[in-house]
Each structure stands twice: as structure tokens, then as C-alpha cells.
Image: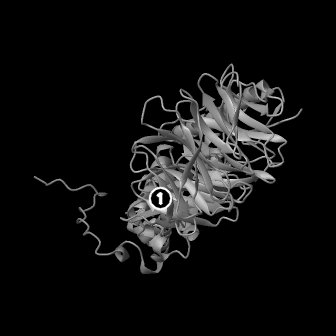
Amino acid sequence: MEEPRPPTDAQPPAPEAEPPESLEALVPKRRLWPVFAVLGLVIAAAGLLAFRSMTTADPLRILVAIDLDGTWWEGSQPAARLADELGEHLAELGFDPVKGGDPKVMKALESAKDPKEAAKALGAGFIIEARLAPEIVEHPVKEGYFELRVDAPVTLTSLDKGTSTEGRIRGYSGATKKDRAMALLANSMASQALDAVIAQLMDHPSVREITEGSDIKLLERLASARRFVKDRAANLDRAAAAYAARAKEVEAEEQGRVTFLSPQAAEDLLVGTAEGGYFVKTADVSVFHSVRSRDLARSEALETVEWRPLDQPAVPTTDPGAVKPMWRGYHVYSYPSSQRDGDRAALVEDFFGWAKTITVVDRSGQSKRVRVDPEHRFVDPKLAPGGRFVAVYDRPEAGAQADLMVLDTDGGKEVFGFHTENQSLGGFAWLDETRLVFVYVPDASEDDAPHLAVVDVGKQPLSIERPFRAKPGEDLRNPAASNDGTKIVCVVDGDEPGIAVIDTATWRRKVYAAPGGASWPAFSPDAARVAFETRGAGGTDIAVLALSTGEIKKLTVGSAAERVPRFSADGKRVLFEVRYRDPVFPQKRSISRIASAAVEP
């Protein structure tokens, strides 16, 4: 049988091909370069994309470059504290603060010639810069105490546009160790730095392009920042309106008779008057919107003692146009006083509770600490005319009975001390450059009347005279002397209450009735009138007594508390404090504004 023959178009099976040993086996050598070119382009494009992602300005990426004893990438711990807290605030609002820890980030920061170059290399859209060079005050406390003060501009710069805006941050701190004081300062600066730049940051065109765009993810990311800025603006407007409205109410009550000299939100105390102006102690606060509480908060400025011209309205101490203060510090303990017809003031300075001083300052800014004590509490310092001596209440410890002490301001030597083991004190005043008068109440019997005692601290040996004694059952307080020392005025309570004017030549008195009571009397420069506090319908008012006629004229009639009257140097006006509750922080502080009223219409 014949075997079948294969079809004529059939082919024998081909052997399996071996895998190519190289690319050349697939593509001829002369045609390999296009392949490598394509691969190179792909790799280059990927690298360029990665590079651009690192270096293209991202409007939400921010480098915090605040120098506080160096920058954070240079190893400054205070700067790192500040940057970390500010970065945390920015991250909460949806931004991307540059952080350490990434070797590429640290290399860019350390190799750049300046922070702006580093920010560009890191693709940041903005940089927040400030150089905080704290003023360091080393206080003479036994254990040592460092006070740090900062007042510096903070700048927000757009790396893409090259535009900048500037705010300002102020603060202070204190501790027994400088490092600890720096750490405390850093912690307090972050919120201020955010407040100084956030409105400008959110209003920048590159950020506004996001907040006004349609990218849902980016809009959600900045939702917190948008709410924060909106709430911040509304709350700051509310605070400004509240201060303005309350000030308008208080001013309207006086019906145009009172001129207000302090800003609407001031906390000013009247220290004294002199030719052309007055001395004032300030304790200003700035209102800001806290990122932590999402509500209004207070930033307290350092307190000052200032000289202000009477014919110029004052501005807050944080305002660029504010006058240079005579003194600036953490806290003035009790009321300061000014030298009668002079250019100096005396104050008790508080070193963050660690010590108290008796300090004398002049209008040029020269200051001298006459006495420093970590335990004693000095109260109500009064400079003698001429400024050679300062008298002060001296409490050996908090809550103790006050002694009376007089110091020589040149060397701080105690020249007179009146100890109150068996007696009490009721006020003191200088008659002239060396004679001090004080109310002295012996405790020999409960109904013993107070005396006016006089001591001349410029004479040795010292002797205390008691030229005047009140009637039994009477009380004397708030003594004040006329400029020439010929008269003393006191408030008297008892069967014949009112204002007692005592002639220092004869030591005889005349009592003037004061309906509504009286406190803190003060003579006019010619000793013809006495200004004093008196009770009114809503608080205390200021009144003036004419000694020639006994006529009393009210200068104020408002619901606020008008206090501490002092005549201007020409005798034409009475200056005083106007006190009422702060409408924004009613539980925290009071407004106190210096005002004046004409003695004659």
C-alpha cells in the first residue's frame, strides 16, 4: 500500500528561536541610538519633574527663618522652639511649613548663601523672616535674674513675586537663667508672629488664587485658614468698635467739658504735672486673635513712665509715633510720683516678683536704682522737691505693717526710718526739699487722735515735731502740701467732716464742708484752690474748692470713676484719671485714661 504523500505546500517545522543574547540581536547596531535617546528623554523628564516639584514655588509652603540667637537649622534651640510652634500654627491652618529632619532640606538650608535662596531651593512660596536680637537686662538679684526684651519687625516675602509686607512683634520674658528666659521668650513670640503676617498671607494673589478657585482639595485644605482670617477680622473690628463706642458714651456724659488725652483703650495712671505737660505711667495692651483659643486675646506691652506735652494727644506706646519713654520695664508696683516743679519721677520697679527697687528716672531717660531688695515691698514713693530725697512706705514682707523710710537718692542711704510697732501711719507729703510731714496715729488708746508730725531729714540729729493734733474721734488722711510749703490740706472725718487746710506757720486749721465726701486733695500752684475726688451719682467726680469763698464746683459728672486730680502747672486746668471697665476684657482689666477740665469756663 502506498504511503500518503505530504501536500505539496507543506513546510517542515521550524526550530524554536533562541532568546537574543543582546539588544544588538534585535536591532542592528547602526540603529541603536534612537532607543537610547528615547530612554534618556524619559529619564531626564522624570528628573526634571522631580526637580521642579522640589523647587517650584508652592504658595502653601512656607519657610520660617526667624533668627533668635541664630536660626533653627543653625542649631539655635530658642529659634527651633519658635519655628516649631509657628509651624504648628501654620499647619493647623492648612499651610506646609518647611521642617527639619530631611537631609535634603538641611543640605539646602546649610548650603544656601541666605534664607531666601534656601527657600527657593526648597520650593517655598513664602518666607517669614525676623531678626530678634533681645535686649538683655541682668537685674541685680542675689540669685541672678535675666530679663529679655524684643521689639522687631517681621517680614513676609513672596518668593515668586519678590514682594514683602512687614509687621511687628514685641515681647519680654524673665528667668534666673538666660537660656530659660530665651525659651520663654520664644514660646511667647509664635502667636504674635502669626498675627503679624496671616492677613497679608491670605490676601496675597497666589493664595487668593487658591481660595477663589475651584480645586476642592485645596479649598478644603485652607478652609480653617479662611475661617480664622474671617473671624480674626470680625473680632478685631468688634474690639475696635467696642472701645470706640464705650469711649463715646463716657465722653458724651461730660457734655464737652472734659478733654481726653489718652487713647481709647489705655491703662494710664497720672503720676504728676509740671510746666508744659504731665508724667504718666502706662500699661498698654494690644488685641489679637489667638489661633489656640480662636478668640480675642491680649498682648501686654512693657510698662512705661513717660513725659507727655499737655497740648498733644497721646498714642499707644506700641505706635511708631509714640514718644520715647523715660523708663520701660515689666511692672511698676504701686503709684509712681514726680518731682514737684522738676523733671524726675520715682517708682517702685518689680523684677517679675523676685525683687523690688526704688528707682529714680528723669526726662532724658537716665535712671538710677536707689535701693534693691528681694524681700521688702516698697509702696507709694515720693520725691522731695529738688530730688535729693525719696520717701516711701516700707513693708518688711508682704502683708506686714508699713514703716516710713527716707533715702538719700545719691547713695541710697537710709536717712530716716519711722517704725510702726506701736503706731500707724496715715499718709505723708514733702513740705520742701528736706521737711517731710506725715500723719501719725499713736496706739496708746483706741480713740487717740492722729497727729501731723514733721521731720527735717537734712538736719542732724533728727528730731520729730508734732505741731498739730486732730480733735478726739477725728481721722486725718491724704495729706498734701502747697508748692511753697505754707499750707497742708488733709481729708478729715468725724463730727466736722470735710477738707482741712492747715497753715504751717501757725498750725491752725480751717475745715471746709465737702458734700459727698472727699479724697486725694491737691493744691493749685498758687494754693488758692484745692481739687479733690468726691462721690457722684455713678462713681467719683472731680471738684474744685475755692479757699477764699468756700465754693465747691464740680468739674465732672460722668458715670465713670474720675480719680487722682492734679492741677496743671499754670493752674488753669485739672488733670485726672477716668476709669471704667474694659468693654472687651471686662473681667481682666480696666480702662484708665488721662483727661483734663478747665477750672474756669
Please report the residue visible at 43 percent of the width from the left and 30 percent of the height from the top.
446
| Quadrant of res 528 | top right
**Residue 500 rendering spot, x and y as whole percentages:** 68, 33
Q: Amino acid at mark 1?
A: Val
- In-front residue for pair 470/413: 470
- Relative to 144, say whether 397 is above or below: above
Front residue of this view, candidates 560 and 575? 575
Q: x, y percentage for residue 328?
A: 60, 57
Location of mark 1 (residue) = 98
Graded by Cα atoms within 10 Å as few (under 14), some (14 to 19) or many (20 or more), the crowding at tag 1 reads many
Q: Please give the name of the residue rendered at 10% of the width and 52% of the height, measured from the top-left corner.
A: 1
The residue lying toward the viewer, choosing from 550 and 590, is: 550
Image location (x, y in percent) of residue 490: 65, 37
Residue at image location 60% in from the left, 63% down from the top? 458
* 173 sits to left or right of 143: right
Residue at (63%, 61%) from the top-left corner? 361
Q: Number of marks in the image? A: 1
**Residue placed furthest toward the front:** 506
Task: Kindly state the secondary structure of the residue where label 1 is placed.
Answer: loop
Q: Looking at the picture, tell me which residue is in the foreground, 95 or 65.
A: 65
Which residue appears farthest toward the left when viewing the image? 1
